[in-house]
Image (cartoon, rainbow, N blue to C red):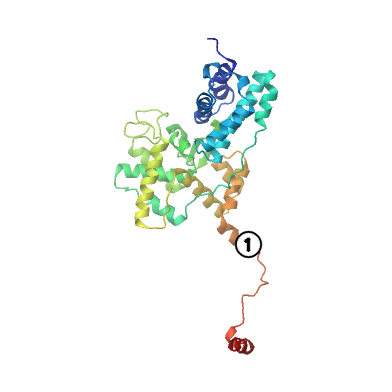
């Protein structure tokens, strides 16, 4: 059977265009791939379309709207997930406009499908006391405890995404003369973030104890498991959950559902509360747009309260008369 135009364009898009011309990360490609896996599942199972016969002409706005409805009603996906899948399809249609100009009108109808409004995301972060309690949980008398203490310190101090942390190699660490980590984030963009002296000290001792770089290469992972393979995102999440549970057993102030990303939010909030400019926070976190960083300023109610208190004119007096001194009021109450 001759390959269809949809098969040709989709294969080129996923295997050549995204990694070659757009230079997107493997995680992004996987997200796009999963979107089309779900779309093909919908086409075959609900629309009863043969996948091997699917053409670009079959990909119209009604098919996409039905797919999005199926995601929400049958698979019970959230609006955020629905919007993410639609964004992947929008990007594919922008690419297909060039590859298949005859279908331009159909692609524009798909591009006109709007995103659904979603609630303002809640920035889950930890107070300084809670963070200190969690960081104190690893047993530094043991080798694994010292590794975990270093990992948690680097995760917080760098403000790294969990994937950026597990992708760190020895070549990404520079401790002298100034301690710096090179993080590779979304879009394979690299940024350098400074480390504070306590974190640098932990990291230096960790490198010495594990003999990293001795007999190996600069491509060795910074944080590895017992098989010397780099830790996975799930592995880091397990470590975070483990010590969060230990801290929760010590004090009830430790909240539930602490993920590695909460450490990133916590770093951003602490920088903001310390008076660091949003532009510097944006660069440290690797945000493309400062509007993304502004969610921390909107979420910090304590910072808002202090700002309002500083600008609040002393016009309203809190003094109120004591009702028991009002004879007329007492007489009226007695008559009742």
Residue pictured at 50% horizontal, 44% vertical: 159
In the visual, does 132 lie left or right of 25? left
Foreground pick, 178 / 282: 282
Residue 284 makes an appearance in the image? yes
- Residue 48 is situated, as x and y percent measured from the top left of the image, at 53, 23
Foreground pick, 306 / 179: 306
Mark 1 Cα shell of 10 Å, populated few (<14), some (14-19), many (≥20): few
Residue pictured at 29% horizontal, 45% vertical: 142
Query: Disc 1 marks which residue?
Result: 308
Foreground pick, 258 / 72: 72
Residue pictured at 38% horizontal, 42% vertical: 238
- Residue 70 is situated, as x and y percent measured from the top left of the image, at 54, 33
In the visual, does 239 lie left or right of 316? left
Residue 168 against residue 277 in the figure, above or below: above
Q: Which quarter of the rendered picture does the C terminus lie within?
A: bottom right
The quarter of the picture where residue 259 lies is: top left
Foreground pick, 9 / 273: 9
- Residue 32 is situated, as x and y percent measured from the top left of the image, at 53, 28
- How many marks do you count on the picture? 1
Residue 126 against residue 77 in the figure, above or below: below
> Secondary structure beneath disc 1?
helix
In the visual, does 42 lie left or right of 247? right
Residue 189 makes an appearance in the image? no
Residue pictured at 57% horizontal, 46% vertical: 281
- Residue 115 is situated, as x and y percent measured from the top left of the image, at 62, 38
């Amino acid at each position: 059977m001759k390959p269809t135009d949809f098969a040709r364009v989709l294969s080129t898009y996923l295997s050549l265009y995204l990694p070659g011309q757009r230079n997107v990360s493997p995680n992004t490609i996987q997200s796009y791939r999963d979107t089309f896996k779900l779309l093909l599942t919908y086409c075959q199972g609900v629309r009863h379309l043969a996948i091997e016969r699917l053409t670009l002409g079959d990909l119209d706005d009604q098919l996409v709207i039905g797919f999005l409805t199926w995601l929400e009603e049958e698979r019970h996906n959230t609006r955020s997930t629905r919007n993410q899948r639609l964004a992947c399809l929008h990007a594919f249609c922008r690419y297909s406009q060039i590859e298949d100009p005859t279908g331009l009108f159909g692609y524009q109808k798909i591009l006109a499908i709007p995103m659904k409004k979603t609630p303002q995301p809640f920035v889950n972060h930890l107070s300084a006391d809670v963070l200190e309690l969690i960081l104190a949980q690893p047993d530094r008398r043991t080798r694994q405890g010292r590794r975990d203490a270093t990992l948690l310190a680097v995760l917080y101090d760098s403000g790294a995404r969990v994937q950026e942390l597990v992708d760190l190699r020895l070549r990404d660490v520079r401790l002298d003369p100034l301690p710096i980590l090179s993080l590779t984030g979304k879009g394979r963009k690299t940024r350098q973030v400074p480390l504070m002296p306590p974190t640098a000290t932990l990291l230096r001792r960790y490198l010495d104890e594990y003999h990293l770089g001795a007999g190996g290469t600069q491509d060795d992972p910074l944080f590895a498991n017992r098989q010397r393979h780099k830790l996975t995102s799930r592995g880091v999440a397990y470590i975070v959950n483990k010590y969060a549970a230990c801290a929760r057993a010590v004090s009830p102030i430790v909240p539930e559902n602490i993920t590695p990303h909460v450490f990133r939010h916590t770093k951003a909030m602490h920088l903001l509360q310390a008076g660091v400019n949003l532009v510097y926070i944006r660069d440290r976190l690797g945000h493309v747009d400062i509007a993304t960083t502004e969610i921390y300023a909107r979420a910090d109610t304590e910072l808002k309260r202090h700002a309002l208190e500083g600008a609040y004119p002393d016009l309203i007096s809190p003094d109120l008369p004591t009702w028991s001194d009002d004879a007329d009021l007492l007489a009226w109450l007695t008559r009742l």
